Image (cartoon, rainbow, N blue to C red):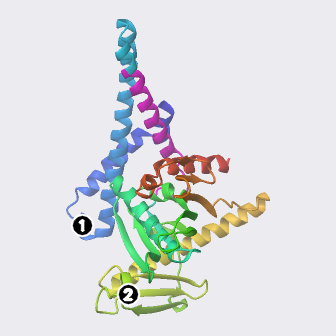
Amino acid sequence: MGSIEAVLDLDNMRAEIAVLEDQAAAPSLWDDPEAAQKITSKLSHLQAELRKTEALRGRIDDVEVLFELAESEGDADARHEAESELASVKKALDEMEVRTLLSGEYDERQALVNIRAEAGGVDAADFAEQLQRMYIRWAERHNYPTEVYETSYAEEAGIKSTTFVVKAPYAYGTLSVEQGTHRLVRISPFDNQGRRQTSFAGVEVLPVVESSDHVEIDETELRVDVYRASGPGGQGVNTTDSAVRITHIPTGIVVSCQNERSQIQNKASAMNVLQAKLLERRRQEEQAKMDALKGDGGNSWGNQMRSYVLHPYQMVKDLRTEFEVGNPQGVLDGEIDGFLEAGIRWRKQAER
């Protein structure tokens, strides 16, 4: 516990909380809603981290007392209670240790998540929609706000693609281990012969861009198209051409946003997504140069990384970490913390 407290630097955390509390109390806080949201979100996150750490320290001290009492009184029930609490404390310590492993350049950022249907037709589109729900349910379980920027619906069922942001500190560091190709095996509900179908969906996780990132974009290198947003089945979401699609001509990157009523707001959100994609492209280019210098062929873990098998047996397995569970429905309902923790530990080990 002492090493975890040292890494978290509780004194520095308390000082940062004090500064943020002063900023949050300023009368002009909400003059800039975006900055205000960042301040209040970070303050809430740090306060929760501090409370969790202090509470865990108290539980560790209490466990020692419980064992001493059980031994002195020879009470088997009290000893069983102490052992149960010790197991619970160890689990909480493991979870907190994972937080200390998030020390990458962008790990403390909010996360921008892109999901797209890949091979598998309508089953892949349905799977992509299930993954979107899985991540949003995970965020809800942790009280993390989310905002969907754009969803492109498939004709029969599911979605072609979606982009959404998870607005919580360290969301990028936590969710970045989800990047790669996810594979679903099941009896297809869309096959009238009831055959088994394998389908794929791709997940991309990017850090949300901040003003300090200096991602230069030449407006002359952009093509901006406006169109009417549509929902499931192709019905119109609104009656004006407010949805925006931006193409970055030099790289061919295309982003779009349709969640706002205003074309100006949608363009601003789409530009944020484009900046995040260009920032990630720059990071990957720098990483490729480092890998070349090290004689490293690069890290291929971000390709096919997890299988969700619903038939002929029930299992979700991470192909990198070997972490697996036998409850696919729970996983698809947002119970993915075990996979995230295993992925973060695996990544840290791979970096050594």
Gap between marks 2 and 1, in whole Å?
A: 38 Å
Q: Nearer the viewer, residue 175 or 154?
A: 154
Please rate how many residues cluster around mark 2, counting C-alpha atoms within 10 Å: few if below 14, some from 14 to 19, many from 20. few
**As shown in the figure, which amino acid type bears the numbered disc 1?**
Trp
Query: Can residue 307 be seen from the camera position used here?
Result: yes
Q: Residue 267 placed where, x, y %? A: 40, 84
- In the picture as drawn, the residue positioned furthest to the left comes out as 27
Q: Nearer the viewer, residue 109 or 133?
A: 133
Label 2 secondary element: helix
Q: Is residue 36 above or below residue 93?
A: below
Q: Is residue 130 above or below residue 95?
A: below
Q: Residue 286 placed where, x, y %? A: 66, 66
Determine which of the numbered discs, if any, sits on residue 234 in the image: 2
Q: Residue at x 22, y 65 (%)?
A: 28
Q: Nearer the viewer, residue 126 or 219?
A: 126
Q: Residue at x 35, y 51 (%)?
A: 45
Q: Is residue 10 above or below residue 124?
A: above
Q: Nearer the viewer, residue 191 or 295?
A: 191
Label 1 secondary element: helix
Q: Which residues are magenta?
A: 81-108
Q: Is residue 66 above or below residue 330?
A: above
* Magenta residue check for 163: no
* Magenta residue check for 89: yes
Q: Residue 179 placed where, x, y %? A: 56, 63
Q: Residue at x 33, y 40 (%)?
A: 51
Q: Specify which label sits upstream in the sequence, 2 or 1.
A: 1
Query: Mark 1 highlights which residue?
Result: 30
- 2 and 1 marks in contact (CB < 8 Å): no
